[in-house]
Image (cartoon, rainbow, N blue to C red):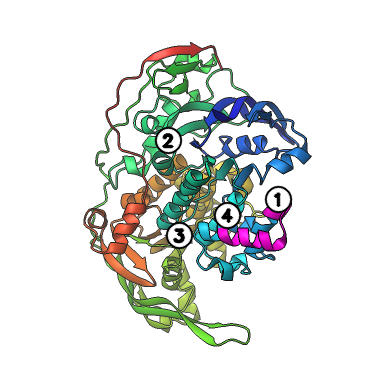
Amino acid sequence: MALLDVQGLTVDIPTEDGTVHAVRDVSFTIPQGAFFGIAGESGSGKSVLTQAILGLLPTADVRGSALFEGRDLIGLPQAQMRRLRGSRIGTIFQDPLSSLHPFYTIGAQVAEVLLTHDSLSRDEARARTIEMLGKVGIPDAAARFDDYPHQFSGGMRQRVMIAMALVMRPALLIADEPTTALDVTVQQQVIALIDSMRREFGTTVIMITHDLGLLSSTADEVMILYAGRRMERGRAATLFRAPAHPYTAGLLRSSPANHAPGSDLSPIPGRPPSLLATPAGCVFAPRCAEALPRCRTEAPPLRLYDDGTQSLCWLESGSRPLPAATAGAGAASGAPASGAIVARVESVELSYQMRSFLGPVRRLDVLRGIDLTIAQGETLGLVGESGCGKSTLARVIAGLIPATAGKVTLLGRDMATLDRAGWKDMRRQVQVVFQDPFGSLNPRRRVGAIIGDPFRLHGIARSEERREKVRGLMELVGLNPEHYNRFPSEFSGGQRQRIGIARALALNPAMIICDEPVSALDVSIQAQILNLLRQLQRDLGLTYLFISHDLSVVRHVCDRIAVMQGGRIIEMAPSERIFTDPQQEYTRTLLAASKAPPPPGATSPRLLVNSIGAA
């Protein structure tokens, strides 16, 4: 029996530039108790689709129907919709910190759902809340009821959000990017928790994500969206091994898991279209390597195959097996580069004195006896759970935080002995590419000025010469130099990350620290950025310290990998040795938690059983 039956859903959003056709004629059904995945590039309409169903787009023109438990949610009065949200439909948002109010305790925020939707006393709501917090894995839930969100880690805050979404035992749970930016072990815990709650309460789950590996291991069925249209839908077991639509195949080819370590990735060429206009033919045709002449002029039919797969495509072949990964010319060597030592870290420790109001002074040890070297031209990966000290170690190496003990040597110079002039020169040698490309760029300044800041701050080049250098950097990282005067908001996520890379390259640094540079990007844009970083390394001899929680990315780009746990490096070896012969139990736990799309496999040929008009 279908819990949710969506038919012909169309969402138009008015803007100053015109009407954005965010979702176009999307239909799907989800049976009771299913785990349904929605994937696609940024801007494909994933979140807008569910927001429209939930009635969270008051200014949008929403058409079609969405029958939930036999009631059409589209056009439902807001008073009735509010009664359903929280009681029958729960939602988990991407960023738990911004979704939880910092002024209220986590217990009060979860209990509020019960007090709003159920006739309970405050004591009863407290008891139910503590029970649910315990179910989602909050240790000592009764004692932590009165704690605030900032007192929890990212994974624990996400568990609180899950408790809030499930405390009323809703029939439907919508999880919008619930694991983005979480490390692999916490990610595994969150997904296992959602799945266990689904089985215990009979809850149906819709999960929106750009992590294809995650969907391949959790979802029963998957729907792929592109430019607001449903490109493909099918069982996860077959869709990821032999996709029917060229777009789905393109997403999977972009994944580092489907390429030999070090080889160039295969991103989908071009970029998604503007949603202000409606193309005459297939919306994916301009980026499709298999496009036929009619694809550009005629809307494609919906192809139905004998295994239940549906594909919006003119091509009748129902199977596109992915080629097995083969090593490329740029494959990682698996060993340190044979260059001079750029950075040397010796017995580095970092501790903080923690003072609480009227309480004792406690010592927090963040780094404990770190030793490592980074050679010129090498990419050293840092992996480990959140809070293990990865980013802190990177800041110590960059000179942003002084070490409590030990020695950091950069280009042969002891950083503890540098004077003011020496520090200014050293700042030129180490640059950082941050995780959030939008948050690291000043939204009020033009891109040309942002990229040119290093030249200005270090007194390099006059105004006109600086402009030419900036244009050259933009061209080097694949940006159009004509966009020199645009603001960051006028660029896509991948383009903004290229801006950050161009700024890092400006002073020709000895080393670039990449702190989660692709974790917030969808798989095709991620492939473009990883290819760019490797190409720049080959062309310019760059040295990278690469921090990431995505082990398939780390395996692909890094020569060596250092595994951190509790402020220590517990294992360090060439990349392939870490993955094929890990020595530490913790390393094996990280690898076991990592999810990647299944490798290409033999599948039975799909048979076309029907074609439904032109969508």
Q: Are marks 4 and 2 in contact (CB under 8 Å)?
A: no
Q: Quadrant of residue 328?
A: top left
The label on residue 118 is 1
Whether residue 461 is visible to the viewer of this picture, yes or no, is no
Asked whether residue 511 is drawn in magenta, I would say: no
Kind of residue at disc 2: Leu
Write down the residue under mark 3: 515
Write down the residue under mark 4: 163
Q: Which residues are magenta?
A: 114-131
Kind of residue at disc 3: Asp
**Looking at the picture, how far across and down is residue 415, in whole percent?**
41, 78
Mark 2 to mark 1: distance in Å? 44 Å
Could you tell me which quadrant the C terminus lies in?
top right
Kind of residue at disc 4: Ala
The label on residue 251 is 2
Q: Are marks 4 and 1 in contact (CB under 8 Å)?
A: no
Q: Residue at x 28, y 56 (%)?
A: 559
**Looking at the picture, how far across and down is residue 104, in whole percent?**
68, 65
Query: Is residue 65 or residue 542 the one in the foreground?
Result: 65
